């Protein structure tokens, strides 16, 4: 497909789908598709080449499926405007590296990805990818703003060693030099690669492969935004060939959570520490239904003295798990044997996901302290 045709394929469908939190079984927005093969889980493949790996692409929306009126716009556009089949059609090169099936899980900007969407995704990935020996791996297309939360959630809840690759884009599909198409091709390639197995979930963007456990969005605008500053990347992709710097390994102290029977994730709030921070934010959070709280502390988890006393009161009187993380973006909050729970090397967003998952399994205060303590000095 030439560049112009490719742009038209994207542009023609730009107005079709509206952002919607509905869970869709697959993308029906693209007409005239002939499927070559439907597997027992109902996944439709446009080709079934036996010499290629089978990869399912779960689409959730975001900038990678975004559309703007102006091809120089990298802000203020509509995220989640294009359906999964449109994204697949725009990158026919992926059919040289894998047989792909698309599933539209949602079509939203990533701030609207909810814990019910995450649970639905984990359940489906475990069923149609992990439990199906014919599937090599999966790709999840996602907005970049909260991508690190979804990546961490799937890393903890997908029960097999097959590569689950989360991918996004910083430029909408309609922009000059959109990064989505190549990011998508690279992520499908990694998801189909044997070398990518047993490394936990992965984030592939901008020619880099990162561990979902630690990677974060570090810049609001640029394409090299996904980094794990202390831990680095797992590998690179050159001319669409993945290269891993190390053999397969999982992050130290990672907690896996079986969500097979989990139907909802309890509410966990994040509170940001600052000078003059007041205690009512903490009491309000709990009064309004938070079952756990993460503090984005200044430095290594610090808060002012009055707030510290409020934390102690809630822990002693209500047994509310309150995790101290850091607002600095890097470094750790070291393990403490009593009092509050320390986040170790997990940032506030990832700490919130882990705390919610542990609460969903009915874990108590000390089990939660122990789980976070495995990621800490
Ligand atoms: N606001 C968008 C989102 O997270 C940004 C992006 O995808 O890059 O959905």
Image (cartoon, helix red, strand yellow):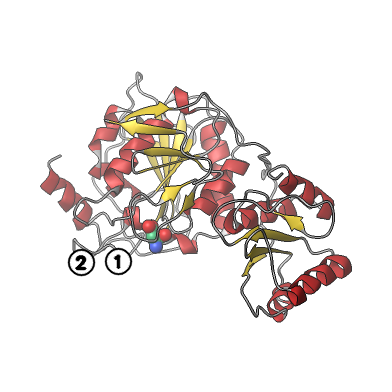
- Where ligand 1 lies, by quadrant? bottom left
Q: Position of residue 353 (x, y in %)?
A: 62, 54
Classify 10 Å Cα crowding around label 2: few (below 14), some (14-19), many (20 and above): few
Residue 83 position, x and y percent, is: 33, 53
Which residue sits furthest right?
317
Q: CA distance from mark 1 to mark 2?
A: 8 Å
Decide if ligand 1 comes within 8 Å of the CB at mark 2.
Answer: no
Q: Is residue 278 left or right of residue 65?
A: right
Depicted 37 relative to depicted 207: above or below: above
Dot 1 surroundings within 10 Å: few (below 14), some, or many (20 or more)?
A: some
Where residue 267 appears, x then y in whole percent?
A: 67, 64
Q: Nearer the viewer, residue 79 or 24?
A: 79
Q: Is residue 38 visible?
A: no
| Residue under pointer 2 | 69
Q: Which residue is mark 1?
A: 77
**Residue at image x 72%, y 78%?**
279
Residue 17 in the figure: left or right of residue 199: left
Dot 1 or dot 2, earlier in sequence:
2
Mark linked to residue 305: none
Q: Secondary structure at mark 2?
A: loop
The residue under the point 68% across, 61% down is 301
Is the residue indicated by label 1 positioned so its CB lies within 8 Å of ligand 1? Answer: no
Q: Is residue 276 left or right of residue 178?
A: right
Q: Are marks 1 and 2 in contact (CB under 8 Å)?
A: yes
Q: Closest to the observer: 223 or 10? A: 223
User: In terms of image quadrants, where is residue 355?
Assistant: bottom right
Position in image of residue 68 (x %, y %)? 24, 64
Residue 198 higher or lower than 168, as above or below: above
């Amino acid at each position: 497909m030439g560049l112009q045709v490719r742009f038209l394929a994207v542009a023609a469908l730009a107005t079709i789908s509206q952002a919607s939190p509905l869970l869709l079984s697959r993308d029906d927005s693209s007409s005239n598709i002939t499927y070559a093969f439907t597997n027992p889980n109902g996944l439709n493949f446009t080709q079934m080449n036996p010499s290629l790996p089978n990869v399912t692409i779960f689409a959730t929306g975001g900038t990678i499926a975004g559309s703007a009126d102006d091809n120089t716009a990298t802000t203020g556009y509509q995220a989640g405007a294009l359906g999964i089949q449109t994204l697949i059609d725009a990158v026919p090169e992926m059919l040289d590296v894998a047989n792909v099936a698309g599933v539209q899980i949602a079509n939203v900007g990533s701030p609207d990805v909810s814990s019910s969407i995450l649970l639905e995704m984990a359940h489906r990935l475990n069923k149609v990818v992990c439990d199906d020996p014919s599937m090599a791996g999966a790709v999840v297309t996602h907005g970049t703003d909260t991508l690190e939360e979804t990546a961490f959630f799937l890393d903890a809840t997908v029960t097999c060693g097959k590569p689950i690759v989360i991918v996004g884009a910083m430029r909408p599909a309609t922009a000059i030099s959109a990064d989505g198409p190549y990011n998508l091709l690279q992520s499908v390639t990694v998801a189909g690669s044997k070398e990518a197995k047993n490394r936990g979930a992965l984030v592939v963007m901008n020619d880099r492969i990162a561990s979902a456990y630690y990677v974060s969005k570090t810049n609001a605008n640029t394409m090299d935004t996904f980094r794990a500053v202390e831990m680095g990347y797992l590998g690179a992709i050159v001319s669409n060939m993945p290269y891993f710097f190390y053999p397969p390994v999982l992050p130290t102290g990672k907690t896996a959570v079986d969500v097979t029977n989990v139907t909802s994730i309890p509410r966990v709030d994040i509170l940001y520490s600052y000078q003059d921070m007041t205690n009512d934010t903490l009491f309000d959070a709990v009064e309004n239904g938070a079952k756990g709280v993460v503090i984005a502390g200044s430095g290594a988890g610090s808060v002012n003295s009055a707030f510290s006393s409020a934390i102690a009161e809630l822990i002693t009187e209500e047994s509310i798990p309150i995790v101290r993380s850091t607002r600095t973006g890097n470094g750790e909050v070291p393990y403490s044997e009593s009092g509050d729970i320390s986040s170790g090397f997990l940032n506030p967003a990832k700490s919130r996901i882990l705390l919610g998952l542990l609460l969903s399994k009915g874990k108590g205060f000390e089990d939660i302290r122990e789980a976070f303590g495995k990621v800490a000095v």
